Image (cartoon, rainbow, N blue to C red):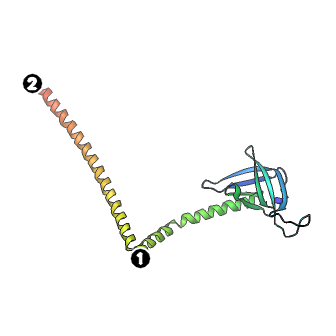
Amino acid sequence: MFQNLRQNTQIYILHKDSNPYLETGSVVSIVGPKPKYPVPGPVGQIPGIETVVDITVAVNGQNVTFQGIPSNLEIADSFKDGNVVITASRDAMNAEVNSMRSKSEGIIGSVDMHRGIVQACDRMLSELNPEYAERQKQEREMAEMRSQISSLTSGLSELMEANRRLMEQLQGSETAGRTSAKKTN
């Protein structure tokens, strides 16, 4: 639990963006626990009140403060600092990384299914909306025309190259013929 952290405790920090990475730091200071929401009333801790801590961690030579971390949790998200997960437990971080990996594997594995859904939706939209069907038909025709133009351009380039080589061969044999004619005269 974060409320039990002490100075120099090792902290794992997982940055869950498009290129996730893990950092390790150590606790510099911890402030709290304090009520998450200020509550007027008697001095002291009221049972049942959610408490939070502010943790300052030394990471890569810099101090980073995570504010409002629930004091009774072992692992927590710190959305204020981006999509970041922190914990002092290696096991909890292993579970978080494995969960993130499994989720991504599931998404990768469902790509073909979602492509099929997109195709089915296109068919249904074509049936429901003649305008959509016409637009899809035009897009297919344009893609086919682009492909044909690309093929023609490639064929034309090859033809031009073959023509250039033929012209070089003809010029070479014509020059050779003139040279041998001069020698016989």
Which residue is the extreme one toward the left? 185
Q: Is residue 143 above or below residue 177?
A: below
Label 1 SS: helix
Which residue is the extreme one toward the front? 40
Q: Is residue 61 left or right of residue 181?
A: right
On residue 128, the disc is: 1
Image quadrant in which the N terminus is located: bottom right
Q: Is residue 121 above or below residue 170?
A: below
- Residue located 32% across and 53% down the image: 150
Q: Residues within 10 Å of mark 1 (few under 14, many from 20)?
A: few
Q: x and y percent of residue 28 in the render?
A: 81, 49
Q: Earlier in the sequence, mark 2 or mark 1?
A: 1
Image quadrant in which the C terminus is located: top left
Label 2 SS: helix
On residue 184, the disc is: 2
Distance, label 2 to label 1, CA atoms, is 85 Å
On residue 151, the disc is: none
- Residue located 83% across and 53% down the image: 30
Q: Is residue 175 left or right of residue 134?
A: left
- Residue located 81% across and 52% down the image: 9
